[in-house]
Image (cartoon, grey):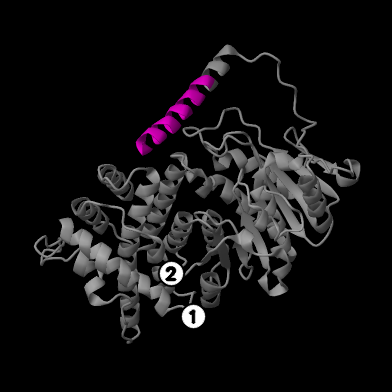
Amino acid sequence: MFEQTFKNIDDILHKDAGCGSELDYVEQTSWVLFLKYLDDLEKDKATAAELTGKQYKPLIDTEYQWNVWAAPKGADGKIDHHKALTGDDLADFVNIQLFPYLKKFKVANAENADTIEYKVGEIFSELKNRIQSGYNLREVINRIDELRFRTHAEKHEMSHLYESKIQNMGNAGRNGGEYYTPRPLITTIVKVVAPEIGNTIYDGAVGSAGFLCEAFAYLQNSKKLTTTDVEILQKRTFYGKEKKSLAYIIGTMNMIFHGIEAPNIVHANTLAENLADIQEKDRFDIILANPPFGGKERAEVQQNFPIKTGETASLFLQHFIKILKAGGKAAVVIKNTFLSNTDNASVALRKQLLESCNLHTVLDLPAGTFTGAGVKTVVLFFEKGSATKKVWFYQLNLDRNLGKTNALNEKDLAEFIELQKTKGESENSWSIAVKDIDQNIFDLSAKNPNKKEEAALRHPQEILEEIKALDEESADILNSILKLI
């Protein structure tokens, strides 16, 4: 039901002059979906209060509640189209009354950033209604009103499909890819890091909050939770920062949809913080992150870091090393060129990582892991506090080319998870001692000594299939660009 509804909404938004891409579809679906979700959440809270003999005070004033402006119902339980706003009346109400009303929640709750009220205010301070036609908006509302978020199964299905929407946004290009890390990779990373209840978990480049959502799911299933455990997970476990408005909105909503009522995500540029200002109270037990690759930072931002570089990911890695607690664990996705670049900053950063942390595992990923990104990446797993003596590498070698229609899956990573436990050697894995690498440049290139040499000539059919896959991916990117013109 959710999947078909999302497809129908995309078709409606495709016709609207204010929505030109998959990014707009996700953003505009999100705010309407959020208000319907909030309405169901309020109903659940009212029911829970009633069962304990208490009275629940609604978060939203009566005239702005979903069942008054969006979906007033008749005696038959269906939308009463005589009362429901549509056309210009609906667009004017949303733009002139509803959004300004919801924005005020942030100011009214300025001292309580960890409440759902504050998050409502933040979300609607960042968003604009881009659906120009009030008739299209009415159609979107009618579709979303059919959805229910009352049971655990309904919420789980909806959060899963919302993730799919974010993935499609990433596949659509226009920087959307930086919001999405493949879910099988995130799941694998979380399993290897193995957080525990009571750990603080941080992502300073939070994007769509995939790492935090997956860590939440992992911890929820780790044991039978006590009331105290639930409160710890809700309020004192997950933290993040995000620079870009749309990613911040989507990340916040994604966490709410997954069950974190008031996510501790801050809309801020992580790299604007001077490393020298980070104190012990600011540090975290676990860091899970995929900072943007390919970005370049201005000189004034670089002044916040002891190792000066314009490379965004390298600045983030310095931040993560500094903000990780002693004994803390981290997993960071970064371009594979970080392992071998010979510029002064890269050499200095590798030296710092090896000397201040135990870089125990490097997962070398194949090209195509990140759809449309066109770069090869590795995942660095490290613990802070003792120097690295030995690094275990695992090279993910697949018998197919990864792409939009042939994505990474959890089965692909199953061997890595098993071998990582013992750091065993295999055709795909090996270890190197830090004392044996060049102590001037600390080159950590993932050169697999155990992989059998491939034949010099490839089969013509294999080449043709790769050309076809690349052509299909190029066509998808071109179509995305043409939609924006």
Q: Residue furthest bottom?
A: 53
Query: Which badge, 2 or 1, is on the more N-terminal residue?
Result: 1
Visible residue check, residue 423 = no
Residue 266 in picture, x, y percent from top left: 53, 66
* In the depicted structure, whether residue 467 falls above or below residue 215: above
Are there few (<14), some (14-19), or many (20+) residues within 10 Å of tag 2?
many
Q: Which residues are magenta?
A: 467-485
Which residue lies at the image location 38% right of the left edge and 44% below the top edge?
22
Residue 113 in picture, x, y percent from top left: 49, 74
* Residue that badge 2 annotates: 119
Q: Is residue 82 left or right of residue 375?
A: left
Discs 2/1, front: 1
Q: Is residue 14 left or right of residue 235?
A: left
Residue 278 in picture, x, y percent from top left: 70, 69
The local secondary structure at tag 2 comes to helix
In this view of the protein, which residue sits in the foreground, 280 or 157?
A: 280
The amino acid on which the numbered mark 1 sits, given as a three-letter code, is: Glu
The amino acid on which the numbered mark 2 sits, given as a three-letter code, is: Lys
Residue 328 in picture, x, y percent from top left: 72, 63
Q: Is residue 71 left or right of residue 305?
A: left
* In the depicted structure, whether residue 232 falls above or below residue 213: below
Are there few (<14), some (14-19), or many (20+) residues within 10 Å of tag 1?
few
Q: Residue furthest left?
A: 82
Magenta span main SS: helix
Which residue lies at the image location 22% right of the left edge and 59% below the top edge?
91
Q: From mark 2 to mark 1, how far is it between C-alphas?
A: 12 Å
Which residue lies at the image location 57% right of the left edge and 18% below the top edge?
462
* Residue that badge 1 annotates: 111
**Which quadrant of the rendered structure holds the C terminus?**
top left
